[in-house]
Image: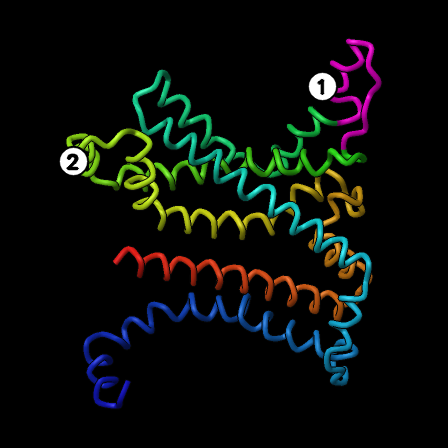
């Protein structure tokens, strides 16, 4: 933008827009941008508040940590299991609710309800089910089976996945419903006239025009999968079973021990992983759009 176009933009109300946006920009800078830059800086020092530049030593120490590798592996495993399962289930429910089915309004409301329930209440509900003295163990005891400490077993990952899917499926269903309802019905009518069956309509119309929505849902689901720490922390504590020890647990424990350098290095590595995943996803979406055009 040259000086002449900048002056023209300022005369058209650009200065007023800056004044209106200033409070939000200042707050965003103070609470997000500045702490983020400070965190990146701290990850390259050997001590807080005036530490010396240490290069990539903190990153090497984090990568050599068995706790970090375990946490990173569990987080990627959780994302790899929960995100595809969530997308498939939410897409199936959206297709079902997009039709005239019995109690459709009640079903839509029931899927959206977990979105407005506080996290503590969600965790309490799952504790009632899977606690040592919970409902599931009470049923096992009733049928003369041994109780199982679910949160201290390999099945703990499945419990976290189910909780994540149950909590987020309603949001994805809403997005998929909006995408399905935006597809013109004329396309389906034309396909029926030309003799296309339901399966062919699904692959050549529904999936094609639902792809932008699916990419957005996949993006949001991946980001939300990295924020499952609240539920896991409230459900299993600071040091949970090895299978559900996530990256956020590692960073939380580094914060408690005041090891800010490893904390910021681990956070930077997680951010880099998220950025790479999102960049790859956006690149795939761009290529797909070019193919459609």
Q: Earlier in the sequence, mark 1 or mark 2?
A: 1
**Eyeballing the image, is 78 above or below 169?**
below
Residue at image coords 48%, 64%: 279
Q: Is residue 134 magenta?
A: yes
Q: Residue furthest top?
A: 143
Q: Which mark is residue 244?
A: none
Residue at image coords 53%, 42%: 84
**Eyeballing the image, is 41 above or below 3?**
above
Q: Which mark is residue 135?
A: 1
- How many numbered marks appear? 2
Residue at image coords 69%, 68%: 264
Quick check: 260 left or right of 20?
A: right
Magenta-drawn segment:
131-150
**Eyeballing the image, is 274 above or below 58?**
above
Color style of the picture: rainbow
Crowd rating for badge 1 (residues with CA inside 10 Å; few <14, some 14–19, many 20+): some
Camera-side residue: 278 or 192? 192
Q: Is residue 220 magenta?
A: no
**Residue under numbered circle 2:** 190
Quarter of the image with the N terminus in it: bottom left
Say if mark 1 contacts mark 2, CB within 8 Å: no
Label 1, secondary structure: give it: helix
**How far is mark 1 from mark 2, CA to CA?**
53 Å
Camera-side residue: 249 or 192? 192
Give the x, y percent position of residue 250.
75, 56
Quick check: 274 left or right of 241?
A: left
Give the x, y percent position of residue 127.
70, 29
Instruction: Residue 142: name its quadrant.
Output: top right
Label 2, secondary structure: give it: helix
């Amino acid at each position: 933008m040259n000086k002449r176009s900048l002056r023209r933009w300022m005369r058209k109300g650009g200065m007023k827009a800056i004044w209106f946006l200033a409070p939000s920009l200042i707050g965003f800078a103070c609470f997000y941008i500045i702490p983020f830059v400070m965190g990146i800086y701290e990850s390259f020092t050997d001590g807080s508040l005036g530490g010396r530049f240490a290069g990539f030593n903190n990153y090497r120490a984090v990568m050599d940590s068995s706790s970090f590798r375990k946490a990173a592996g569990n987080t990627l495993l959780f994302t790899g299991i929960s995100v595809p399962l969530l997308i498939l289930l939410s897409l199936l429910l959206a297709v079902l609710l997009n039709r005239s089915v019995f109690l459709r309004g009640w079903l839509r409301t029931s899927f959206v309800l977990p979105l407005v329930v506080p996290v503590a209440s969600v965790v309490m509900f799952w504790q009632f089910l899977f606690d040592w003295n919970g409902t599931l163990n009470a049923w096992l005891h009733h049928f003369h089976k041994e109780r199982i400490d679910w949160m201290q077993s390999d099945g703990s990952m499945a419990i976290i996945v189910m909780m994540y899917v149950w909590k987020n499926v309603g949001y994805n269903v809403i997005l998929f419903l909006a995408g399905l309802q935006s597809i013109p019905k004329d396309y389906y009518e034309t396909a029926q006239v030309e003799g296309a069956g339901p399966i062919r309509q699904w692959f050549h119309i529904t999936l094609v025009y639902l792809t932008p929505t699916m990419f957005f849902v996949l993006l949001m689901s991946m980001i939300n999968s990295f924020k499952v720490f609240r539920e896991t922390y409230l459900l299993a504590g600071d040091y949970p079973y090895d299978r559900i020890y996530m990256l956020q647990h590692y960073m939380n424990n580094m914060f408690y021990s005041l090891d800010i350098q490893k904390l910021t290095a681990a956070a930077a590595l997680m951010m880099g992983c998220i950025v790479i995943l999102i960049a790859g996803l956006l690149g795939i979406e761009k290529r797909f759009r070019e193919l459609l055009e």
